[in-house]
Amino acid sequence: MEVKKVVLVLAFLGFLYLDGLPLCTASVVHNYTYILKETNFTRLCSTKSMLTVNGQFPGPLLRVQKGDTVFVTVQNNGKYGVTIHWHGVKQPRNPWSDGPENITQCPIKPGKKFTYEVVFSDEEGTLWWHAHSDWSRATVHGAIVISPKNGTSYPFPKPYAEEVLILAEWFKGDVKEIIDEATATGADPEVSDAYTLNGQPGYPNNCSIATTYRLPVIQGKTYLLRLIHAGMNEEMFFAIAHHKLTVVAQDASYLKPINTSYVMISPGQTMDILVTANQSPSHYYIAARPFFDSNAPYDNSTTTAILQYVGNYTPPSSPSFPTLPNITSKSAADNFTTRLRALASKDHPISVPTGVDERIFITVSVNQLTCDKTVCGGPNNSILAASLNNISFSTPKIDILQAYYRNLSNVYESNFPNRPPYLFNFTGDSNDDLLLPSTGTKVMGTLTKPLPPRLITWLIHQKSIPLEFLRVDGLLLDLLLIIPEYGICIVIWKGMQAGV
């Protein structure tokens, strides 16, 4: 069906302010363009071409204030289809722009483009964006910084400055070829050749000392480090030599402050960390290495950056190195994670549901599928596969959200179980009978239809338009704001059907 757009403009007596469409609201609309393209990078003594956004690794920083909206147009000039996911952004009633491939959209094909509408609501702190197609996120990712609204502040003293630190993994090979090979054979994928901090492996990796990332600091000042783990697999221990860390937020949610000498951060997580430069002016290593307690192959290397004091002094021949927990230390991992507590206050409240309608118990595991070839690369000639509640996901040919709206059959089933099929000691017991999962494309519960993509931007003068006018799919929409009487507003309506 042809999409027709109707624009309705209502103006009332008052002051009209137009700048990036912040119409009648304190929140701001931002517009960005991301160009996906192959770019050459040299690390670990060799050069390779890899998929990037705007030729950067890590990708560009997306900076907003709480409550803002961002439109990001992604032009895919790469060699294969990709989507972008806005990790941790809640996107209320806006799943069309969430980004998981084959869930909310099909991949953006080479030569095509797609515009995401990223709606920030109550998030405040650090999140990140990344590709959500196979392993393309290894090279296509970047930070999201969400500052407090004007007139509000952090629940801690404002730092002198802030810095984004992104942990990632470096593969000498092509990451798409690596995961394609693993998928074809059913074996473990090749492990990374190094970890990186802000794109650089650092000491002690080959050909990396001169390009080690450096963070300049002024003695006596406090800095907010926005740490993001964009790696593929391993949890990481992170520390700074001779400097204490105070963790104040995780995944854009404030925490009760944790004073510690190290943190343990998982792939996909973010942490906001306060560090005071209270040592003698010198150079101090920032270091990270994995925490790993499995018998699967993994990268056991270390990545570093340098905390470098500003001033006139003789730099050390070898900067101090932090004390990191042993790679296999479960007690060190537990000692940190068990201290995480949410911060709830008048200025930063937390809404916790008081009633439970349905209890859902989900287990995550790595299983084995039966090999349908002569030789497969998994244990006992099997295929390695992840599962939720012992169901391994089968990728549909069309995205699930589109299938739902078009009422298409044979795309997914609405019977994902609310508990695993077998209950046992999930902390360590194993049994060969539990290794073979089923496969399927399943969803849970009854879906509530959100608005069609980019249907409406509501900026409504409450006394000027009947509320019945705001009903979509029989639901009364919440207003984004209430304009004072005799105020002004511009309403933009983009109808998706003729006659709207």
Image (spheres, rainbow, N blue to C red):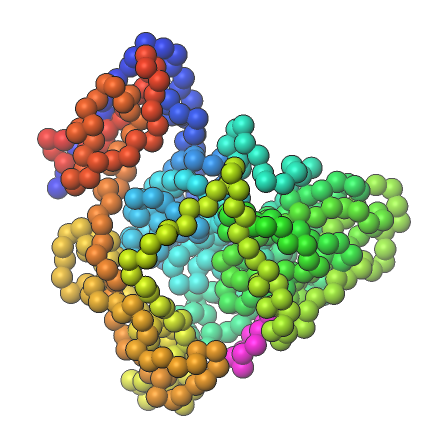
Specify whether residue 220 is painted magenta: no
Number of dots carrying numbers: 0
**Position of residue 178 measured from the top left corner of the image (x, y, whole percent):** 45, 70
Q: Quadrant of residue 287?
A: bottom right
Q: Residue 322: x and y, percent?
A: 75, 62
Above/below status of 305 relative to 75: below
* Foreground of the two, 43 or 121: 121
Query: Is residue 123 left or right of 76 when viewed as pictured?
Result: right
Residue at point 14% right, 36% down?
497
- Whether 221 is drawn above or below 213: the answer is above
Q: Which residue, as the protein is rendered here, is positioned at the far front?
A: 354
Quadrant containing the C terminus in the rendered view: top left
Q: Residue 190: x, y in percent?
A: 50, 74
Q: Is residue 214 above or below residue 339?
A: above
Q: Residue at x 62, y 66 (%)?
A: 335
- Does the rendering let one see residue 142? no
As drawn, 327 above or below 66: below
Residue at 43% across, 29% down: 28
Question: Depth check: 388 or 183 in front?
Answer: 388
Q: Nearer the viewer, residue 121 or 201?
A: 121
User: Which is the main secondary structure of the residues drawn in magenta?
Assistant: loop
Looking at the image, can residue 103 be seen? yes
Q: Looking at the figure, which quarter contains the N terminus? A: top left
Residue at 44% across, 26% down = 26
Left or right: residue 445 versus residue 214 is left
- Determine the image quadrant of residue 107: bottom left
Of all residues, the one furthest to the top in this rendering is 13
First to last magenta residue range: 290-301
- Comparing 155 with 83, the one in front is 155
